[in-house]
Amino acid sequence: MNVFSHPEFDNHEHVSFFCDPKTGLKAIIAVHNTSRGPALGGCRMFPYATDEEALRDVLRLSRGMTYKSALANLDLGGGKSVIIGDPRKFKTEELMEAMGRFIEQLNGLYIAAEDSGTSVADLQIMGRNTKHVAGIASHPGFDGKPSNGDPSPATAYGTFVGLKAAVKHKLGITDLTGLKVAIQGIGNVGYRLARHLHEAGAQLWVYDIHQDQMDRAVEEFGAIPVSADDILSLPVDVIAPCALGAVLNDQSIPKIQAKVIAGAANNQLEHPYHDEVLMNQGILYTPDFVINAGGIIDVFHERTDHDADKVRAHVESIGETLEEIFTRSDRDQRPTGVIANELAEERFEHISAQKEQATHQFAKAG
Ligand code: NAD
């Protein structure tokens, strides 16, 4: 298995492998870039078929976190960890404690948060052996209400802010009354996004694989339930993918009638080139890793200050970042995802250069 020459390696600063035979823990921590600060990212537990699959996932996700944090203007770098194994079969308290010890060995270079296969409770168990875990403390959320560490409310609010920015840019609409929005996935984020949109006067169409999730949106928000096949191709203004990745692909894109895509799901584009396909079809794609950053912003503030107004203002800055991306995209006639990556690189490379200069001056002064 190659590491330095791995196609996803992308100059990672640090990759470590951990094995604890007593608990069966096999884990990898990848730290992509710490120029803006310590690397914060989720700890995923998944039954990877091979070690190579686990390495690929952790490298790809860790790099993504560098870009996400930079675009959210956070003093954080990008990192991620994976535990190899089926969480429903192999997750034990001892294994999570061992993961905590592993994280502690990195001395704060990496800070773990919840991800698929791990819960706030698991992070709390890891926290017995390390303080470098995030998203576990109760604190006032962005809306001033008590939060138990769940990032979903902030993610949903950030997605709402981003959707408004996209609609304003593409359709010139600032009043959402009567705006037609189709939401795919009415889970933790999708449900809350639906509530924000309903309160702003939007008309909703929904689909979720779980009937009870749809029923709730129908009852509470007067949403119209539709089928899996229809949700992305309805004649609406906006589609908001809030379920799973790779939903924007060669099959779905030609059928999309909405002019704006703005949802929280991670990795919505099946392939990077789909960004350009959407642009050529006259559809404004809101890059997922920009619009769904509310959660990481919330987690960051949980560790630094607990000021609800600051968190809210920070989450709202997602709208300004998106406006900058949309404007550059129009100006250069290049896809929004490509522009978002470039803007992130500007933000973390700029800080690196500043730090290097400061170190150089410090050395000279000595
Ligand atoms: P969730 O599991 O609470 O909700 C997902 C919903 O999608 C569920 O109701 C599920 O039944 C539904 N679903 C699954 N497959 C579907 C399908 N094929 N079609 C329609 N619905 C389907 O997850 P969440 O926390 O709401 O996250 C939603 C998305 O946003 C995920 O892609 C997640 O990675 C991303 N995201 C979430 C956060 C956060 O703070 N929760 C932060 C960043 C990104």
Image (cartoon, helix red, strand yellow):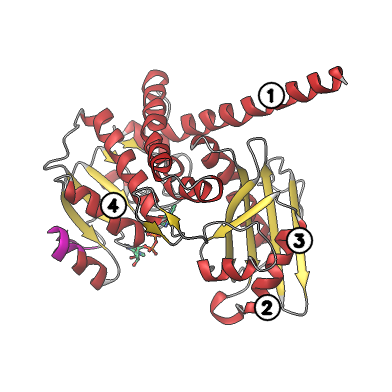
190 or 111, which lies in front?
111
Q: Amino acid at mark 1?
A: Ala
Between the C-alphas of marks 1 and 4, the distance is 38 Å
Q: Secondary structure at mark 2?
A: helix
Q: CA distance from mark 1 to mark 3?
A: 30 Å
Q: Which residue is mark 3?
A: 17
Q: Which mark is residue 353?
A: 1
273 displayed left or right of 193 = right
Badge number at residue 193: 4
Q: Are marks 3 and 2 in contact (CB under 8 Å)?
A: no
Disc 2 residue type (three-letter): Glu
Q: Which residues are magenta?
A: 217-227
Give the amino acid type for the residue marked by disc 4 in the picture: Leu
Q: Amino acid at mark 3?
A: Phe
Foreground mark, 4 or 2, reads 2
Mark 3 or 4: in front is 4
Circle 3 — which element?
strand
Judging depth in this view, the residue of 83 and 250 nearest the camera is 83
